[in-house]
Amino acid sequence: MNLGEMQTLKIEKRVEFGVYLSDGAQRVLLPKKQVPENTSIGDEINVFVYKDSKDRLIATTATPKLTLGQMGVLRVSQLNKVGAFLDWGLEKDLFLPFKEMTRQPSEDDEILVRVYIDKSERLCASMKGIYELLSTKPPYQVGDEVEARIYEFGHDFGTFVALEDKYSAMIPRHEDTSKYRIGDIIMVRITGIKEDGKCDVTIRDKAYIQMDNDAEALLDLIDSYAGVLPFTEKASPEVIKRETGLSKAAFKRAVGRLYKERKISLEGGKIRKIQEE
């Protein structure tokens, strides 16, 4: 009998509260309300085997949204002191322990998880190990815009996303994703596809569109500094990123756009806003 999997079992015994199903070695209860009509001893039924609230094996004819080893999107139905509980289509929610979270979700968030068996032989969910389960055979081309779900913030690497909840991709670390949360769905653009099939993506618009947005944001930042920016393109990439949210290359493009449009001056080693007359 396989915990966490759909399987075909034979009715061995009928009792007042249901029927016992057997695989020849073990037996499990299928509650009365789950028993199909007009069944008899010896009939075979396709069921899912999991554990009830008292950690006893139990069968159901309902099909869960995920089975053992599978990955998919589940909604957080409850959050408490021990972890989260996810709606996976069965009466008893699937438990997500705190130690299996990459970042704490909130109730009603929809997050990518996988199903595993813990040390206590219980079915649980994990937000870890998603990277290895995503497909690396994307049907995309560079330049395509695709829907992506954030499943992990990778610190030194970048932000990991699942394209259409199926394919592996990463937003580079120099792009600011601090306003997003685990489970958020965003639009990204494919910037590269590696030999191993994993995708590089960006949340930024195409350069000529993004440059306008960056230039406008930079002009607002200069205003906040009373018209004179306290650093220039010669500042370190870390300083530029911290102060503007832009990579050094994007910052230089925005400065160039504003200078060309005569909205700033670069005299005396300062980036200064030109006041309109």
Image (cartoon, helix red, strand yellow):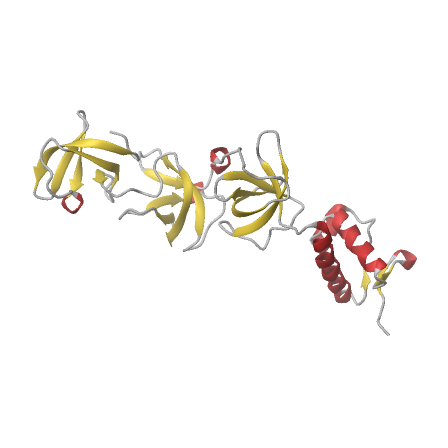
Horizontally, residue 62 falls left or right of residue 277, namely left
The residue shown at (22%, 35%) is 46
**Where is residue 255 drawn, in percent x and y?**
80, 55
When asked about the image quadrant of residue 26, the answer is top left
User: Is 60 located above or below residue 194 in the figure?
Assistant: below
**Where is residue 115 drawn, in percent x and y?**
38, 38
Q: Residue furthest top?
A: 25
When asked about the image quadrant of residue 179, the answer is bottom right
Horizontally, residue 94 falls left or right of residue 110, namely left
Asked whether residue 176 is in view, the answer is yes
Q: Quadrant of the C terminus?
A: bottom right
User: Is 209 located above or below residue 50 in the figure?
Assistant: below
Asked whether residue 231 is in view, the answer is no
**Where is residue 68 drawn, in percent x and y?**
35, 35
**Where is residue 117 drawn, in percent x and y?**
35, 34
Identify which residue, 104 or 254, lies in the foreground: 254
The residue shown at (67%, 46%) is 174
